[in-house]
Image (cartoon, coloured by chain):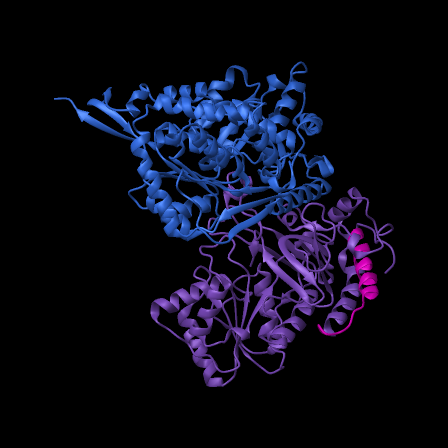
Chain colours: A blue, B purple
Amino acid sequence: MNASSREFAAWSLPAGLVPPEGPRGSARVGDVLLRWPQADPAWVRGVGEALRRSRDALRKRTARDVAALAGAAGARFLDSTDPLRARALALLPPTAGLSAEMAEAVLDGMARDWTGERLGRLLGAEFANPAALDGFVPGGLGLARAVGPRLCVQIVAGSVPGVGATALLRSLLVKGPTLVKPGRGDVVLPVLLGDALRSLDPVVGDAVAVVYWPGGSDGLEDAALDEADVVTAYGSDAAVQELRARTPVTTRFVAYHHRVSLGVVGREALEDAHRHRTASEVAGAVAFFDQRGCVSPQLVFVEEGGDASAQDFAREVAVAMEAVERHLPGGLLDPEEASVRHQVRGAAELQAAAGMGVEIHDGGAAGWTVIYDPGQDFGPTCVGRLVRVKPVADVLDLPRLVSPLGRHLQTVAVAGCGTRLERLAGALTEVGVSRVAGFDAAPFPAPWWHHDGQGPLRALVRWADLEAG
Amino acid sequence: MSGPVPPTAQPSEAFAPLAEELEALFGRGVDAVLDGGAFNDLALRVFAFQFGANPVYRAFCERRRATPGTVRSWEDVPAVPTTAFKHVDLVCGAPSAAEATYVTSGTSSGGERRGRHHVPRVALYRAAALPNVFAHLVPEDRPLAVLSLISSPDEAPRSSLSAMMGFVAEAWGDPVRWVGHPELGADLEALRRGVAEVRELGRPALVAGTAFAFVHLLDAMARSGDALALPAGSRIMETGGFKGRTRAVERDELYGALESRLGIPRNRIVNEYGMTELLSQLYEPVLREGGGAAGRHVAPPWLKVRALDTGTLAPLPAGEAGLLAFFDLANAGSVCHILTQDMGTVSADGVRLQGRSEGAEPRGCSLAVEDLLAEGGGRT
């Protein structure tokens, strides 16, 4: 890319709307200068009003048609001849802190679910009859329909690129205009998707606005929250709590707060014939998104009594992490992430020095870290490809061990639990886990997964009944 | 002392003469000159002692291939991350032989691990803390009455901050008025009584407390409509952040409210920066140099501060923001070189703190597992 294209305007607005005049806010992320409008609450309200007005045209489309249109825009990110994909691939590494290789893998994994076929399947999985989004259909007390939001405001965290674009698509599928405020690490894809939708179809495109502003801009957020009838919020517990407190009681609030994911490796996957592959899959699940995903395992429990000890398995995971590093190198951590990693690595070195049985393997500047830790506590963890491997006597002990994390548990990645899997999964879900999956599948749940325990589209709609007789 | 002492030695044998030497140095005050070479010599001698007497630290240094035989500069002495104090005992000699163990603060839920700083010789802490208190809180060297929102050492024997207030009480031979409250932060009724007594004495007061305690005091005063007029010349020592507590308040707002409710102008409010893991503190020199010094902290000559690159931990040029690392000779009984999670810049005239997340927008979503159990880890 040439020098001038290394500026990125972090907004995508419906036709007829322009950013307020005056100086732009800006920040340098990597070698890209990110610019955003110095918005004021009145302007945000204006965007909200325009989006609500766009719904009249949008609701005349069928949900299936919207899915097909949105899919046509989304699929462009998969087309290696499309300049949109090239632009995304050029901008993602610096803005999301990912290596070029990882950025491409993330884009492929995310955009795979943005095609018409996958979005259509999502509709079918969420609604027995997706025509309920278009009008009354038989059901319930006679007839029933699912009404999408007049305006869905979405405040998205910046951890993983693609989350904001996925959120945008979810709202469109239920025929809800949406205002997306992406996090700084995830501005590129929703903006490019918004522009792509608008060039394809003005009706759908005018139902989408994406605007970045720095987190903590309370006045802007309050204006947006007031305009919405559905709000989705992604982020830390504190950030989501704060947004929830400021959202009117009559507005539906869908919270995607902090989550933690774990892994468990049973004896069967430690057998000599399978162990190498298991270690590779564990390393891949940890490394993906540089571990910033809420689906990324931070602790992996390894069952004792198999062909390899947890300590030996940790060494194999370290070898596999190094191999991942070669084809999907780690990216840049932000200062706070890097700081925490220094703390966790240093503390593990001291635990090892103290004879606590801790063993630390790391890739030095490459950034990955595997810590074998037989201690009773979970131990400190962080993002940036750092995994703690802990022994467990029996995989069925895991639900009890992790129950203190219950309210924050999300994915448990599993390998080698054989016939015990269903029993284990049942007990895990009782303590709070919402997803049990293989390590290889862990990074990319299908679009119709129960995201943090709820249907991703059903969470956005309001059902209405027309009673028989 | 020359060369490492055997790891089996009790700290007292080799430690006492070294500690006495350091105490004498600290006793010369914060304005005494300690040039770079003299600091380095002392630092390396203390490192050699710790290498011999602190077996966990020794093994850590050996892993990093740093020994008293190879290290030539204090900057190359391996730094220990503050998090490690939660997980291992870092002390010269046996932890059980330490005269005091200070722990980092927790949260109301109390589920988290706390850092433990074992201190074999409390006199060394006292010797480091008091000259700094005098220099920055009573530069004019006149007796003050003390109102402390910080708990007394009797109430909080594991708090390093309470220990420091205890040193002040002993040194001034004046009964400190303890007006703190273990849960609420402040006991308004006790403070009212304390202020009345102080006014009776006609002596200016030092009001000491954490930011958390002051916020709760001001809330209580706002509810009751109190405004307490402290005698002219009174001052405040405010310390600590709001980490893991109920409510964050901008510092400017806090100081403005302190001025209006306690009658102490903001150029007489001194921020102290310290942590359980460091036995020396930094202060804003506003009483020594005037209100223009606000926002800048200075260290005593026996405490060196550097800003390090967040990625590589390489030292940064003056004025560039990085992770703060401290080499504190007062930590001779544990580990001197400490890597914190605090960001700041270091220049010839002092340290400018930036707090933990300034410059980085929180990414959200994935959080350290321990933090999910409870936020925590501040200083008490």
Q: What's the residue at 45%, 20% (across, down)?
A: A118
The residue that appears at 76% across and 48% down in the rendered structure is B55
Q: Is residue B42 magenta?
A: yes
- Does the magenta run of residues contain A98? no
Q: Residue B378 vs residue A217: left or right?
A: right
Q: Position of residue A60 (x, y in %)?
A: 29, 27
Q: Residue furthest front?
A: A16
Q: At which x and y percent is residue B242?
A: 51, 57
Span colored in magenta:
B29-52
Q: Main secondary structure of the magenta part?
A: helix
Quadrant in the picture for the N terminus of chain A: top right
Q: Is residue A382 visible?
A: no
- Decide which of A296, A64 is in the foreground and name it: A64
Label tally:
0
On the image, which quarter does residue A138 sit in?
top left
The quarter of the picture where the C terminus of chain A appears is top left
